[in-house]
Image (cartoon, grey):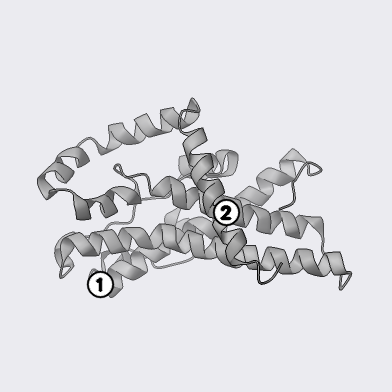
């Protein structure tokens, strides 16, 4: 997939900002939608079943998303006791966020390849800026999905891990959610998590590339 060596740094950040305004609402609205379908309307009633970025905006998370490609939004409130099966309900509603990002990345991959192929064949001229936009839609959605699947609180992966952990241990760990979040962010800042996250993201991108080979 094409690089972005010729694009100005400011334009890169603007592209990331646009992608963030699309990606974060999809992620959070997916949580709200699935939790509502499973019986908990808390997030829906709070206005989180929306693609309006303002409903989900967290300043620090948005800045991190634009600068580093990963970030977060305001947490979606979910009441597990409203699910018929609280463990399964929490896991499925948590998985909805990363899954929505992977779907966005997959659709963006198909569009990227169709545009690149059309440009290569001379069917019509595709602006490089448009290709760059879809490149970031792919890479940032994959990275956000992988980042959120880290199996520690407060990430979505921790709710999925609840399926395999005794509940008392899970909620004991949840007491330290804020400290764990700070610790994970520090690991990201100092580059400790950069390599493993990059490797997993590259594997996911390769799978998507293979899955869309019917296009190109």
Asked if residue 124 lies left or right of residue 4, the reply is right
Which image quarter holds the C terminus? Answer: bottom right
**In front of the other: 203 or 27:** 203
Q: Position of residue 129 (x, y in %)?
A: 77, 55
Q: Which residue sits furthest right?
A: 122
Asked if residue 46 lies left or right of residue 190, the reply is left
**In front of the other: 164 or 30:** 164
**In front of the other: 133 or 49:** 133
The residue where tag 1 is placed is 38
The residue where tag 2 is placed is 205
Q: Position of residue 69 (x, y in %)?
A: 56, 44
Q: Which residue sits furthest left?
A: 168
Taking the spot 13% from the left edge, 48% from the top edge, the residue there is 166
Numbered disc in front, either 1 or 2: 2
Q: Position of residue 84 (x, y in %)?
A: 15, 70
Q: Position of residue 94 (x, y in %)?
A: 32, 58
Is residue 169 among the parts visible in the rendering?
yes
Q: Earlier in the sequence, mark 1 or mark 2?
A: 1
Taking the spot 61% from the left edge, 50% from the top edge, the residue there is 17
Question: Splitting the image into 4 quarters, where does residue 8 fall?
Answer: top right
Give the structural element (helix, strand or loop) at label 1.
Answer: loop
Mark 1–mark 2 Cα distance, whole angstroms, equals 30 Å
Q: As displayed, is residue 9 above or below residue 47?
A: above
Give the structural element (helix, strand or loop) at label 2.
Answer: helix
Q: Which residue sits furthest top?
A: 190
Asked if the residue at tag 2 contacts the one at tag 1, i.e. Cβ–Cβ closer than 8 Å, the answer is no
Q: As displayed, is residue 166 above or below residue 126?
A: above
Asked if residue 66 lies left or right of residue 38, the reply is right
Taking the spot 17% from the left edge, 45% from the top edge, the residue there is 170
Q: Residues within 10 Å of mark 1 (few under 14, many from 20)?
A: some
């Amino acid at each position: 997939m094409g690089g972005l060596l010729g694009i100005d740094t400011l334009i890169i950040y603007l592209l990331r900002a646009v992608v963030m305004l699309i990606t974060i609402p999809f992620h959070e609205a997916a949580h709200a939608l699935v939790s509502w379908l499973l019986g908990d309307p808390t997030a829906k009633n709070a206005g989180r079943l929306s693609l309006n970025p303002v409903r989900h905006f967290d300043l620090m998370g948005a800045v991190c998303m634009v600068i580093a490609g990963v970030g977060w939004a305001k947490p979606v409130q979910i009441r597990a006791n409203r699910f018929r099966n609280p463990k399964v309900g929490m896991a499925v509603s948590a998985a909805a966020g990363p899954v929505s990002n992977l779907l966005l990345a997959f659709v963006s991959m198909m569009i990227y390849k169709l545009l690149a192929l059309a440009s290569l064949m001379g069917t019509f001229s595709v602006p490089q800026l448009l290709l760059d936009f879809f490149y970031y839609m792919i890479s940032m959605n994959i990275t956000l999905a992988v980042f959120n699947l880290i199996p520690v609180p407060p990430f979505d992966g921790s709710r999925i891990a609840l399926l395999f952990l005794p509940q008392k241990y899970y909620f004991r760990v949840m007491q330290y959610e804020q400290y764990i979040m700070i610790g994970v962010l520090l690991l990201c800042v100092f580059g400790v998590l950069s390599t493993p996250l990059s490797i997993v993201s590259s594997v996911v991108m390769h799978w998507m590339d293979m899955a869309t080979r019917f296009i190109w």
